[in-house]
Each structure stands twice: as C-alpha cells, then as structure tokens.
Image (cartoon, rainbow, N blue to C red):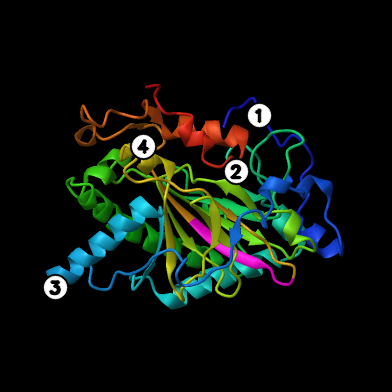
Amino acid sequence: MSKDQPDWPEPIVRVQSLSESCFDSIPERYIKPSTDRPSSGSSDFDDANNIPIIDLGGLGGVDQHVSSSILKQISDACKEWGFFQITNHGVDPDLMDKVRETWRQFFHLPMEVKQQYANSPKTYEGYGSRLGIEKGAILDWSDYYYLHYLPLALKDCNKWPNLPPQCREVFDEYGRELVKLCGRLMKVLSINLGLDEKTLQNAFGGEDIGACLRVNFYPKCPRPELTLGLSSHSDPGGMTMLLPDDQVPGLQVRKFNNWITVKPARHAFIVNIGDQIQVLSNAIYKSVEHRVIVNSDKERVSLAFFYNPKSDIRIEPIKELVTVNTPSLYPPMTFDEYRLFIRMRGPRGKSQVESLKSPK
C-alpha cells in the first residue's frame, strides 16, 4: 500500500460490538441500496442449483477413465461456474474443523486482546472491519483477520494471534496443506487449457508465489435483509480455497443474474477462480461475482485462502492462448498494481477486472 495512506479514513467500529448492542436496527452505514440487498434476485439453494461438487479421490490414479472424468468436471466448472466444491482432497477433516473452531474462539476473546492486532490499510494484515478506504462508504456486516503465509519474507508470526493456545501451530499446518492442494489444482487447470502442467504455476512465479488467509467473522445481524456480510466482488488474486462455516450457509454466487446460495458439502473446500487466472487464461476461465449474506440467529466463520502470483511478476494472457481469432484481452499488470487498484476502491462486483480489458 502507498505510504501516503497511513490509516483508515474514519474510526473503526467492530461489527461484533454492534451486533451485541443493536437489537432491532442497524446503523445507516451498513444499509445497502435496495438493488444490492439480499432479497434482490436471490435463490435459495437446492441440489439442482448448487455449484458442482467434484470428488478428487481418483485424480492421478491408475484408472485413466476416472482421472479424465475429474479433469473434465473441473474444466466444465471453471468455464460454466468459476466455482466448484472438492471432496477427498487430501486435507485432514480434523484439521479443517480444528482451524475453523480455533478462529471462532479467537473472535470470542475479549476485545482488548483482539485490538492488539488491529490492522491498517497499508497491508491489511491483522484484525480488521472494513475493506476499501473511501470515506463515507457503505460498509459490510463483518470483521476479519488477514495474515500472510508466502512469500516467507512477508510471513511474520508475531502478527498472528497467540491465543487461543497453540493457534499459531494450527494455522501454520493448515497453510502448508493448502499450498500443496492449490499446487495440485494449478496443474489440473493448466492441463485443461491444453498447456504443460507447470505453465500456470510458472506464470505465478514458480515456487515463489504469494499465499494469504482472510478469516471472516459474520456476527448475528438484527436486519439481515438490509445488508451484506461481504459485498459483491470477484477475487482479485489467482485461486481461492474457502473453508465455509459447517452449520450456516451464507455464500452466494451469481449465475445468470440470479444469486445462488451455496450449500456446502461436509468437509469440502469451495474453490473459485480469481481475476489473475481469468487474465492468464485470456478469459477461458472466468472469475465470478459472489457475495455473503448474514443471519439474524447465528454467527458465521469462514476461511478464505488466497493462492496468488508473485507480487511483482507481470500477469498477461499466456502466449499459447493468444491467436488471431483470440487476441489478448488484457494488458500486462503486476499483481501488486492490481491489488492497489482494488484496495483503494473496495469490493465492486466484476467492474475491476472488466475495466482492464484492452480496447477492441
């Protein structure tokens, strides 16, 4: 972030504190325009409308038919949805439950403990309650914690909570497992584009990539029909691996101008394509708008793990995917430049990546 932006434009209010003091109303700062409210074009989940659920159990196994079927399912999901769920992914279900519940415990620590980790818009790292630095912006009904895993030069465990006990070890193990899982999926995405399996990973910087975690805490809200836990946006990075709340749905994905509420499968990750992979694939794969609704009766905790390109590497459509008939849609831009562009503006649907398209 720019050194010219030292702090948030207004005093930070913790949404968790608002949730505990608001009984039948919410502050005006959190009330969305009528067109952006949850009831606008929402669809309750049903199995026919749920994002694809893909079993990775046979991926890379001896049965080529099964492996090819998994590749095709992922390819179709990337092109048609930009979202899919994965099961039998190799991450220990006990670790998934443990990391989510450890973070839930953190958000229920006394406020003075959490405030020690309050963040700033310079890096966003730490305990936060807003995205974007526009003064007077309408805010989302959520608090969060943001931390870096990779590159190692940015990984500072002193900026991670040290309570609950052993939490740093749990967070570290979880990060290692998800970096491995994302690496496996990057190979699949490359193969499905007709490229060498290492092409996307190399475009990200090889082993020298970025990885970070945003833990979202969505407190109970007395007027959930007026606000959102997270405004509509596409993810600016490469690929996102979401560990959703295991009890309360809340993620909505845009499909044909409807908002589909995702029904999480047990011990599944929800995977979505980010803007950087949309650019690298020359829009064969598309990042998709999504948002989060809140609940009047129950809080929610989810963990979004972002697998990103090296911050200073130029991201542009891969040359093998650029032809006379499919010209390059995007100019080169580093992830750092794009992230700065996003952070200044806050979540704004798909307008961010679409605005980068080269003029025809």
Q: Residue at x 61, y 32 (%)?
A: 344
Please state if 23 lies on the left or on the right of 184 as rendered.
right
Please state if 120 lies on the left or on the right of 158 as rendered.
right
Marks 1 and 2, Cα distance to the nearest angstrom? 12 Å
- Quadrant (top left, top right, bottom left, bottom right) of the C terminus: top left
Q: Out of 125 and 248, give the one closest to the viewer.
A: 248
Q: Position of residue 96 (x, y in %)?
A: 47, 71
Secondary structure at numbered mark 1: loop
Q: Which residue is mark 1?
A: 5
* Chain-order first, disc 3 or disc 2: 3
What number is the disc on residue 63?
3
Secondary structure at numbered mark 2: loop
Instruction: Identify residue type, mark 2.
Output: Tyr
Residue 81: which quarter of the image? Answer: bottom left
Marks 1 and 4, Cα distance to the nearest angstrom? 28 Å
- Disc 3 to disc 4: CB gap under 8 Å: no
Please tell me how crowded label 2 is: few (under 14), some (14-19), or many (20+) other residues with Cα within 10 Å.
Answer: many
Instruction: Identify residue type, mark 1.
Output: Gln
- Is the residue 53 above or below the residue 326 in the image? below
Q: Is residue 166 visible?
A: no
Instruction: Identify residue type, mark 3.
Output: Asp
What number is the disc on residue 124?
2
Q: Which residues are magenta?
A: 297-304
Marks 3 and 4, Cα distance to the nearest angstrom? 33 Å
- Quadrant (top left, top right, bottom left, bottom right) of the N terminus: top right
Q: Out of 246 and 282, give the one closest to the viewer.
A: 282
Q: Which residue is mark 4?
A: 279
333 is within the stretch colored magenta = no
Secondary structure at numbered mark 4: helix
